[in-house]
Every structure is written in structure tokens, then in C-alpha cells.
Image: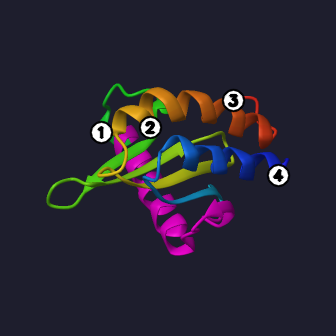
Amino acid sequence: MNLKQVNECLAETEDQLMGGLAATDVFSKQSGMSIAGIRTAPKACALFNVVCERTIDSVKKSGLPIPQELSSLIITLGEDENVLIAVIDIDTKYRWGLAIDLTKTSMGVLISVVLPDMVPRLRSALGSRAS
């Protein structure tokens, strides 16, 4: 694991989101504890880790034909849906959580620019092969 590279990826993410990044953490799936972040949110890491695990279990039990690799979670919050919470599975050990202010950036930038660029780079920095 190269934490310097992980932190560089998070800093670049902040730049790419053009001021819309409220907080971000890469955290352990096992413990829910952050290993790196910007404006880190330890409680959010722990709680969203539980939400992700319960969501994955619910999908499995439901029989819905959703592949395991699509187990990321994206939630919009607020009356005008101006806050986006994204939790992305990086690999078998780590998740990447982001809180984004959609009044300053767009979901399109996140999905079309940031995630395709950063997920492979984070996997590499964490020493991962795949999710």
C-alpha cells in the first residue's frame, strides 16, 4: 500500500470536483476505519460501511440479478437533492466514500470523469488487483 499515492489521488479528486468535495475517505471494509481522507468523517465511514454491507446482503437475499461488482452506493440527499453520498467498492478490503455538494459540481463529472480516472489509480495505490 502506498498512502502517499492514495492521498495524491484524493487531492486530485478534490481538484476535479471543482470545489464540490465536502469530504472523502478511503476506509476498511472490515473495520469501517479511514486510512486516508480529506475533511475525514470517521463516523460516516463506520456507519456507511454497515449500510453497504446490509444493502449487499439485502440484494443477495432479494434474488435481484445485480452483479456483485455493482455494489457501490449512491444516495442524493436534501430537499433539492444537492448533496450526494457515494460509496464505491475499491477492492475486497477497501471502500471509497465521498460527500459531494452538487451545487458546485455535477454527478456527471463524478461518474464520467472522476470515478473512471481514480478508481483504477486507487486500486493500484492500495496494491489491489480487482474488486
Front disc: 1 or 2? 2
State the image coordinates of residue 13 (x, y, percent, origin top left).
58, 44
Calculate the distance from the C-alpha at mark 1 to the C-alpha at mark 4: 40 Å
The answer to which of 63 and 86 lies nearer the viewer is 86
Q: Which secondary structure is most common in the magenta stretch?
A: helix
Sequence order check, earlier mark of 2 and 4 = 4
Residue 19 x %, y %:
46, 53
How many marks the image carries: the answer is: 4
Q: Which residue is mark 4?
A: 4
Mark 3 vs 2, N-terminal side: 2
| Disc 1, SS | helix
Helix, strand or loop at disc 4?
helix
Looking at the rendered structure, the kind of residue marked 3 is Ala
The kind of residue on which mark 2 rests is Leu
Contact between marks 2 and 4 (CB within 8 A): the answer is: no
In the image, residue 56 lies at what x, y percent?
A: 43, 45
What residue is shown at x 65% (from left), y 50% (from top)? 11
Tags 3 and 1 in contact by the CB under 8 Å rule? no
Which residue is under mark 3? 130
Q: Of discs 3 and 1, which sits in the foreground?
A: 3
Residue 77: image location, x then y, percent: 25, 58
